Amino acid sequence: MDHAITASGLVKRFGERRVVDGIDLQVPRGAIYGVLGPNGAGKTTTLRMLLGIIEPDAGSRTLFGAAHPREASDRVGYLPEERGLYPAMKAREAIAFMGALRGLPWREGRARAGDLLEAAGIGHATEQKIRKLSKGMAQLVQLLGSVVHQPDLLVLDEPFSGLDPVNQERLEALILAERDRGATILFSTHVMAHAQRLCDRLAIIAGGKRRFEGTVDEARGTLPQQVHYVPHFPDANLAAQLPPDARADGDGWRFVLPADGIEALLKQLIDAGYGISGLSIERPGLHEAFVRIVGQAAGDADTAREQAA
């Protein structure tokens, strides 16, 4: 597989703390790749090392085959976690300026900026100064500035933070359009809904280590399927008929799908007179898988500390 980014054994220390502890990544070209993790997991530090903004203390990485990522910086669009635009600039000029920093001619940048603002649904802001824009609109302008030079790689650090639902939808549409154009998208987030909808592959980082890598379906597959059963004639003795892990959920019960399937249990419930008012077999979402993977990582870390003590 052809990769836009590879990383092997990345380590970064700040003082005595290992913020990133031996992370491996491979980001396929043309994919949307998510780096997920709770706050403080090391996502931003990892992205900055991949781009050559900071140097790792150990390990290696390549960006489009270049061992020194800055050699390929003109092929990259980057939206950092810390937003920043010149407040006195108009939206069109701000986008053109960001393109010029990546080698895009000013006139072409201004023309593309107008088209991008219209496509994003904020064409009315073309001649407005940044200081006059809402926080969400200013963030979209900065994002458009990161794609105006049509980069091969777009890196977005917590891009959905602070956006209202309308602008979140606009951002998702822009990410998909960039992927369809042929760009590789790498973004970090701790909001699972966006990752579940967008990502072709993802990595989950917790405690500075990579805890999972694969597709969304593979992440969801780390948890068993759940059954939601609603009886037609419930009574106080129903719980004894259900698996030990069953828990009340609204007007029904939820439990892990038995290893031998659901058929035998359903026959038992029908024969006992409970009937079936509702039944669904559901795959856990990415949110549930994320909570389990991160929680397991925290438990492993606690055990390691206890053993060291």
Image (tube, rainbow, N blue to C red):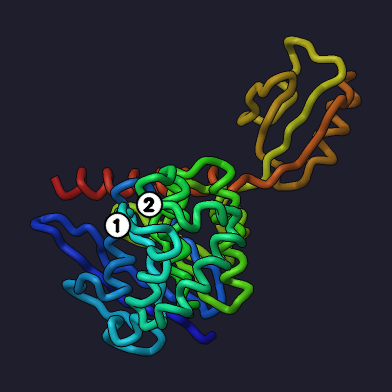
Q: Position of residue 242 (x, y in %)?
A: 72, 27
Quadrant location of residue 8?
bottom left
Q: Earlier in the sequence, mark 2 or mark 1?
A: 1
Tell me if label 2 and label 1 are in contact, CB under 8 Å.
yes
Residue under label 2:
130
Closer to the camera, 7 or 212?
7
Type of amino acid at the residue the image marks with label 1 = Tyr
Determine the residue positioned at 48% across, 46% down. Answer: 191
Quadrant location of residue 102?
bottom left
From mark 2 to mark 1, how far is it between C-alphas? Answer: 7 Å
Determine the residue positioned at 90% across, 25% down. Answer: 271
Picture quarter with the N terminus: bottom right
Name the secondary structure under disc 1: loop
Q: Position of residue 111 (x, y in %)?
A: 52, 73
In the rendered view, would you say 53 is above or below 65?
Answer: above
Can residue 170 be spotted in the picture? yes
Residue under label 1:
86
Determine the residue positioned at 54% across, 67% down. Answer: 32
Q: Position of residue 55 (x, y in %)?
A: 19, 73
Closer to the camera, 181 or 31?
181
Picture quarter with the C terminus: top left
Residue 59 lies left or right of residue 293; in this view the side is left
Type of amino acid at the residue the image marks with label 2 = Ile
Crowding at dot 1, Cα within 10 Å, few <14 / some 14-19 / many 20+, comes out as few
Q: Position of residue 206 (x, y in %)?
A: 35, 53
Q: Which mark is residue 262?
A: none
Can residue 211 be spotted in the picture? no
